[in-house]
Amino acid sequence: MSETNCLFCGIVAGSIPATRVAETERAIAFMDINPATAGHLLVIPRAHSTDLREAGAEDLTAATLLAQSLVSRMIDRLDADGANLLSCIGEAALQSVFHTHLHVIPRYQDDPLQLPWHPTPGDMDQIQATAAKLV
């Protein structure tokens, strides 16, 4: 999707409405209209990039720092018990808007959100072989 067709670029430009909760020179935070839990919001860099692989370091830093401050607000002001920070990269990872964004999801004891995996011990040989490819 090009920058001219980007939903989030429209939000940055103000041509698409959003419930903004915080902004900086380089990043904007607004409420997700399909919330996983009460208070779920998105943090985006103002500059268009498809995902965090393409985001400039200053933009990614600004978005991450804004997300960090919002996690503290969620825990203090929404009585959240914790938070998840999530970035989906590519369709296989459930990315649906191709503009770099971070989901900041407040978590509550007994909330209905289930993440897509349940940690189980892995095969250590396979883990080490995979790690060797990433070093």
Image (cartoon, rainbow, N blue to C red):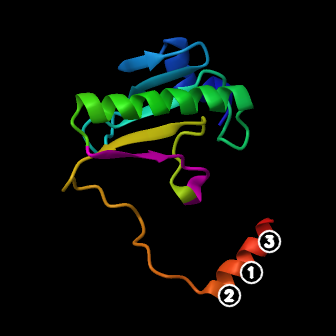
Q: Which residue is mark 2?
A: 125
Give the crowd class for mark 3: few <14, some 14-19, many >=20 residues within 10 Å: few
Q: In the rendered view, does 22 fall on the left or right side of 109?
A: right
The residue shown at (77%, 66%) is: 134
**Does residue 135 sit above or below 89 in this rendering?**
below
User: Split into 4 quadrants, where in the image is the N terminus?
Assistant: top right
The residue shown at (57%, 54%) is: 91
Give the crowd class for mark 1: few <14, some 14-19, many >=20 residues within 10 Å: few
Q: Nearer the viewer, residue 111 or 94?
A: 111
Give the mark, 2 or 3, whose residue is nearer the N terminus: 2
Q: In the rendered view, does 61 fall on the left or right side of 36?
A: right
Residue contact between numbered discs 1 and 3, judged by CB atoms under 8 Å: yes
Location of residue 59 (image quadrant): top right
Q: Which residue is mark 3?
A: 133
**Residue 45 spot, x, y in % from top left:** 60, 26
The residue shown at (73%, 38%) is: 54
Residue contact between numbered discs 1 and 2, judged by CB atoms under 8 Å: yes
SS class of the residue under badge 3? helix
User: Split into 4 quadrants, where in the image is the C terminus?
Assistant: bottom right
On whether residue 26 falls in the magenta region, the answer is no
- The label number, if any, that marks residue 129 in the structure image: 1
**Residue 106 spot, x, y in % from top left:** 32, 42
The boundaries of the magenta stretch are 81-92
